[in-house]
Image (cartoon, helix red, strand yellow):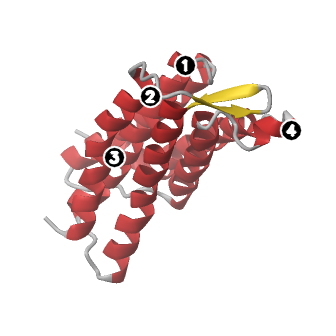
Amino acid sequence: MNLPNKITLSRIFLIPVFIILMSVPFNWGEIQMGERELPVAHLAGALLFIIASTTDWIDGYIARKYNLVTNLGKFLDPLADKLLVSAALILLVEIGLAPAWIVILIISREFAVTGLRLVAAGEGSVLAASQMGKLKTWIQIIAISLLLLHNWPFAYVGFPLGLISLYAALIITVYSGYDYFAKNWHVMRDSK
């Protein structure tokens, strides 16, 4: 297994640690942000999420620079992204920072695209992530990071950038799903 794939796997292995930080009621105190408070455990979880998310850029950069792109990497990288983003979105609903209906739509798109990739794999081809899909992932990461940080530093001025970013992520997620299916529909149509 090459280095980029190991980095991708590290992103997957960080997910349980992230979940524990965000869901176990650690009493590490809180940071005051204007009229809002950010639990220190949520800050730690947000930082871990951001670190895990940056491995997405790192593994891709190394794979392209050193010509280490593999079919396994093409499969694992978007899967790791989906697992990390889905875990974060579900936790955001649990702690009351994201509307469930938005999370359901985003995760539904992820399942649909994964299903299409599985059909393609059954036909012997690997569908890599599109540029639109990569943009979607980064917008989701920005929105999730802001929400995990309880909209810091924008909470000081009462500007809901985290929620606005989540709506932007929803729009680009739905559009990128449509775009991905439009470009790859032949895989479903031609499957046996």
Query: Which residue corresponds to the image point at 28% horizontal and 80% vertical from the top-left?
Result: 67
Quarter holding the C terminus is top left
Which residue position is annotated with label 4? Answer: 157
Q: Is residue 154 above or below residue 86?
A: below
Q: Residue furthest right?
A: 157
| Relative to 71, 116 lies left or right | right
Query: Which residue corresponds to the image point at 70% horizontal and 32% vertical from the top-left?
Result: 32
Q: Spatial distance from mark 1 to mark 3, Cα to Cα? A: 23 Å
Q: Spatial distance from mark 2 to mark 3, Cα to Cα? A: 19 Å
Q: What's the residue type where badge 3 is placed?
A: Ala
Neighbor class of circle 1 (other Cα within 10 Å; few <14, some 14-19, many 20+) is few
Which residue position is annotated with label 3? Answer: 80
Dot 1 and dot 3 residues touching (CB under 8 Å): no
Q: Is residue 130 above or below residue 107?
A: below
Give the mark nearer the N terminus: 1 vs 2.
Answer: 2
Dot 4 and dot 1 residues touching (CB under 8 Å): no
| Relative to 49, 39 lies left or right | right
Which residue position is annotated with label 1? Answer: 95
Where does the image place residue 24, in percent across and percent down from the top left? Answer: 38, 21
Neighbor class of circle 2 (other Cα within 10 Å; few <14, some 14-19, many 20+) is many
Dot 1 and dot 2 residues touching (CB under 8 Å): yes
Q: What's the residue type where badge 4 is placed?
A: Val
Q: Spatial distance from mark 4 to mark 3, Cα to Cα? A: 34 Å
For residue 189, say whether it is visible.
Answer: yes
In terms of secondary structure, where does tag 4 sit?
helix
